[in-house]
């Protein structure tokens, strides 16, 4: 699919395979194989092609991913971490500019989940239970059901379930 999209962008820019090859230092035969799906480009080559076409690489990739906007609860993809203490279910389809997750912190496990900070902003909403979150090792917040907090990129933070019962969080991450 990437090759098909690359082909249409190249034609829209009125470029031949030879001209694109000259701009990328890739052979026209290789570019033809990519466009026809006979080979997959490396990330480095795909970046070179996108630069030559003056096209955004993340946009190209997102345009070629099968898009299914509805994620039903029973169809969520599970990602487990921290020795299976935290259940992480993805709420967004692949290839989009946001990532949504549903985190479940189980009753009886009061271990802190620690992050040194990500390269993207995050937005937490407590859907059930209570949560303690600490930003920059100094700002402590106690959150209840319905409370939300915005965490800027590269902000060290840690959180843990408090109170009785499971705590469920919805986390939205900007992937740009």
Image (cartoon, rainbow, N blue to C red):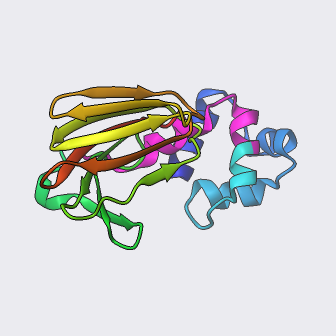
What number of labels is visible? 0
Residue bounds of the magenta highlight: 48-69
Is there any visible trace of residue 21 in the rendered image?
yes
* Residue 127, percent from left and from top: 16, 39
- Name which residue lies at 20% across and 49% down: 167
Is 130 left or right of 40, judged from the image as shown? Answer: left
The quadrant where residue 81 appears? bottom left
User: Relative to 33, is 143 above or below?
Assistant: above
Residue drawn 30% across the image and 45% down it:
92
Q: Position of residue 113 (x, y in %)?
A: 42, 54
Q: Which residue is drawn at the image coordinates 33% and 71% (left, top)?
A: 84
Q: Is residue 114 above or below residue 81?
A: above
Residue 98 location, quadrant: top left
Q: In the rendered view, does 119 fall on the left or right side of 129?
A: right
Is residue 97 in sight in this rendering?
no
Q: Is residue 72 magenta?
A: no
Q: Position of residue 112 (x, y in %)?
A: 41, 54
In the image, farthest residue toward the bottom: 83
Residue 58 lies in the magenta stretch:
yes
Q: Residue at x 55, y 62 (%)?
A: 37
Residue nearer the viewer, 67 or 37: 67
Q: Identify which residue, 27 or 76, lies in the foreground.
A: 76
Drawn side of residue 145 relative to residue 173, left or right: left
On the image, the x and y values in percent for residue 64 come to 45, 46
Tell me which secondary structure the magenta stretch mostly adopts.
helix
Of the pair 65 and 32, the residue shown nearer to us: 65
């Amino acid at each position: 699919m990437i090759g098909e999209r690359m082909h249409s962008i190249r034609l829209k820019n009125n470029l031949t395979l030879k001209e694109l090859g000259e701009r990328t230092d890739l052979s026209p035969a290789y570019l033809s194989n990519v466009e026809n799906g006979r080979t997959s480009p490396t990330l480095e080559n795909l970046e070179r092609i996108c630069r030559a076409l003056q096209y955004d690489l993340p946009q190209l990739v997102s345009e070629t991913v099968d898009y299914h906007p509805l994620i039903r609860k029973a169809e969520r993809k599970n990602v487990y971490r921290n020795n299976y203490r935290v259940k992480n279910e993805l709420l967004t389809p692949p290839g989009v500019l946001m990532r949504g997750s549903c985190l479940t912190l189980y009753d009886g496990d009061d271990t802190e989940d620690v992050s040194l900070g990500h390269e993207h902003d995050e937005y937490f909403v407590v859907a059930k239970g209570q949560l303690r979150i600490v930003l920059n090792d100094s700002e402590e917040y106690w959150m209840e059901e319905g409370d939300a907090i915005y965490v800027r990129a590269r902000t060290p933070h840690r959180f843990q379930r408090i109170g009785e019962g499971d705590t469920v969080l919805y986390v939205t991450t900007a992937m740009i």
